Amino acid sequence: MIVAYDLDEMVDLLALNRPFEGPVGETMAHKVATLPLRDAVALVVEDWADDKFRQLSAVIVRSSGPAIRGFEEIRDLHAMAEAGTAS
């Protein structure tokens, strides 16, 4: 199944807390920013490149469809944005 993405759609970028950042056993996501999808995927792939845990715990919440939870999908969207396509 091919999913089309609007790279200009405003999304919420969330990051899961590291286990040592909160009470034991509590895994919470916190909102990092609201920005266009293209900027959210660039932030995760480029700016968080030195923090693999943060990359893998990124969640992008879209109003137009299901949340993007996998780093592989985020990386693929980043490649599409760089290539100028969004299919």
Image (tube, rainbow, N blue to C red):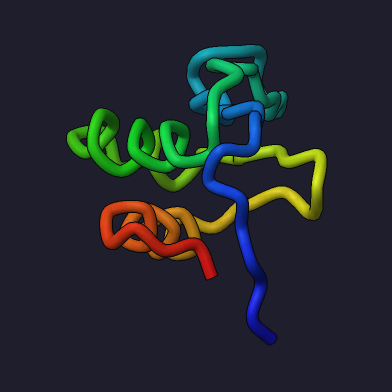
Q: Quadrant of residue 30?
A: top right
**Image spot of residue 81 (x, y percent):** 37, 53
Position above or below: 13 against 74: above
Quarter of the picture containing the C terminus is: bottom right
Left/right placement of residue 27 relative to residue 18 reads: right
Q: Quadrant of residue 82?
A: bottom left
Q: Residue at x 61, y 57 (%)?
A: 5
Instruction: Give the residue displayed 44% in from the left and 58% down from the top.
Output: 77
Name the foreground residue: 69 vs 24: 69
Quadrant location of the N terminus? bottom right
Residue 14 in the image: above or below residue 70: above
Q: Quadrant of residue 46?
A: top left
Give the vertical position of 3 relative to 63 (above or below): below
Residue 20 appears left or right of 51 = right
Q: How many marks?
A: 0
Question: Which is nearer the eye, 55 or 8?
Answer: 8
Residue 60 is situated, as x and y percent measured from the top left of the image, at: 61, 40
Give the residue at the far left of this rendering.
Answer: 50
